[in-house]
Amino acid sequence: MTDTSRRTLLSLLGAAALARPALAATWPDRPVTVVVPFPPGGSNDVVTRLFAQSFAQRLGQPFVIDNRAGANGNIGASQVNRAAPDGYMLLASGNGQNAMNHALYRQIPYDSRTGFSHIVRLASLPNAIVVAPNFPAKTFAEFIAMAKAKPGAMSFASPGAGSSGHLAMAVLQHAAGIELLHVPYRGAAPAITDLLAGQVPMAMINVDIPLPHVRNGALRVLAVTSEQRSPLYPDAPTVAESGFPGFSAVGWLGLSGPAGLPEEIVGTVNRTALEIMKEPAIQQRYAASGYVMGGGTPQDYAAFISSEIDKWGEIVRQTGASLE
């Protein structure tokens, strides 16, 4: 390389180094897209929209939800993975596309440990086993006994292959020695629609989704998968207290961006999210929906995702769960 070429290269690198902080300092100066890799109506979509509204109010630019469903979140996650690291495309990153998929798919087009700038965990989302009022089993114990008596005869709905509902039931089947037929849907809303219509007898789904139907008597909750009982269904036992000590299978959701997102932008999004979590309206909505508040630093969220990849990878190997 000639001296002139070297000076030109150093000049360009210097200019880029100066431009990057300037870009971060003015962010956001136009709308920000938040990719939700699932259809509208599910818990991930609902939580992300709550935060998007508050982000827009606090940061002065629209935060626009883009639902890009498919492949258990891989399609939307891939879009963000390939995006420019300028802060104008973020991902509603959850347990499916950022943890479970690494074990469920032979190959996915990104690495959740290195392919994203993880920012903050927004919420944990417990699951519930939900059935119609005429479901023969009236209790969780009766359901287990019925499933053992007729292996493979009973089906259950989930929001999708590889969802927390799918794998939570896979863990239960493994622990209880039962065999159920999995019916995956493209989201929580269509799964509940078919459950209400009698097309499937039961569902494993986030606790907030069936709430209005449970309250009006159209559905019943047999058990919840969190370590403690859900305040939404105080009479419904946990799986752990129903003969399976230590059982916990909970979904989660946060915000991530493409790898290489400037630290200033990561910090701004993290601090703003933590401030939003203190808003009384957000806390009330969480309580009303059965969500568990998130929080923590970007480093906390990155370490959590790495641990979840290991955890669910081991669960998939133990249970033999697969994508139908």
Image (cartoon, grey):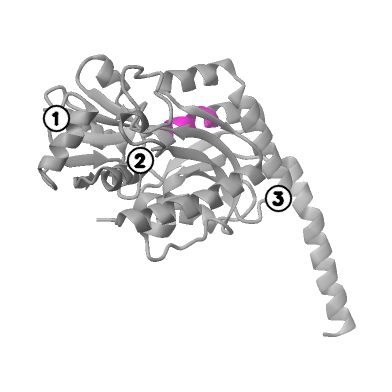
Foreground label between 1 and 3? 1
Is 219 on the left or on the right of 86, as rendered? left
SS at circle 3: loop
Asked if residue 275 lies in the magenta stretch, the reply is: no
At 78% across and 48% down in the image, what residue appears?
Answer: 22
Vertical order, 293 against 92 (above or below): above
Q: Alpha carbon of mark 1 to alpha carbon of mark 3: how far? A: 48 Å
Secondary-structure class at tag 1:
loop
Note whether 314 is above or below 141 in the view shown: below
Above/below status of 284 relative to 122: above
In this view, the mark in front (2 or 1): 1
Along the polypeptide, which appears first: circle 1 or circle 3? Answer: 1
Vertical order, 312 against 29 (above or below): below
Stretch of the chain drawn in magenta: 45-52
Q: Position of residue 270 (x, y in %)?
A: 65, 37
Question: x%, y% of residue 259?
Answer: 61, 56
Q: Estimate the spatial distance between the alpha carbons at disc 3 and disc 2, rounded to whole Å.
A: 29 Å
Quadrant in the rendering for residue 7 = bottom right
Residues at circles 2 and 1 in contact by the CB criterion of under 8 Å: no
Q: Which residue is mark 3?
A: 262
In the depicted view, which residue is nearer to us: 242 or 41?
242
